[in-house]
Amino acid sequence: MRTDRYLLRAVKYFVLLIVLIVVLYALAYYFEGSPMSVEEYVAMLIADPRAKWLLPVFGALALAYPAFGYMTRSLPISLEQNRVGVDAAMRACDFALAGERDGVLLYRATSAARRVRLLWEDELEVWSEGDRTMIRGHRAAVVQVIYRSEIYMRKENGEEL
């Protein structure tokens, strides 16, 4: 994982958690499940001693998220042998080649919905390491691409799915 992005990812996740709690409370208020307005609830979160642990817990979760939310996985075939399969898997998973940096292929999500869902951390890095293809990025996207790539490799080898 690029260490220069760690803090930025943590801040994005912290903001997402805060927005999520406010949206959930707004829905509860809208459907008359809460006696306080959203503004009163936010003020209570900031001032109430019973809620003083919520923001630090969100901060701890946000700091831990980049460590387990991003990963590197490999395919048991070199990128040179499997470039067509990797490109096909990326297209099937809604990623397109965005460029190359220091021998590493960079893929980005093509749809706005996927970019938002991945908090604009939609860059997947693909490179060859010996006879293996390495893929690094957001955990959900990497797992999806690995799964699709393995399907394409099996099809090329004539194996049944």
Image (cartoon, rainbow, N blue to C red):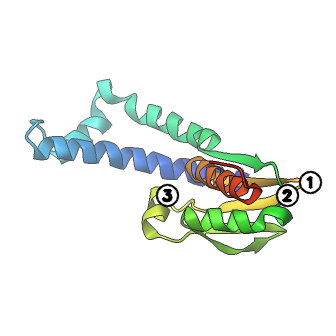
Disc 1 residue type?
A: Gly
Q: Is residue 41 above or below residue 107?
A: above
Numbered badge on residue 130: 1
Contact between labelled residues 2 and 1, with CB atoms less than 8 Å apart: yes
Tell me if mark 2 has few (under 14), some (14-19) or many (20+) residues whose alpha carbon lies within 10 angstroms of its own: some
SS at badge 2: loop
- Residue lying farthest top? 50
What residue is pinned by disc 2?
78
SS at badge 3: loop
Q: Nearer the viewer, mark 3 or mark 1?
A: 1
Tell me if mark 1 has few (under 14), some (14-19) or many (20+) residues whose alpha carbon lies within 10 angstroms of its own: few
Contact between labelled residues 3 and 2, with CB atoms less than 8 Å apart: no
Q: Is residue 106 above or below residue 20?
A: below
Q: Nearer the viewer, mark 1 or mark 2?
A: 2
Disc 2 residue type?
A: Ser
Q: Position of residue 127 (x, y in %)?
A: 80, 60
Q: Position of residue 20 (x, y in %)?
A: 34, 46
Q: Earlier in the sequence, mark 3 or mark 1?
A: 3
- Residue lying farthest right? 130
SS at badge 1: loop
Disc 3 residue type?
A: Leu
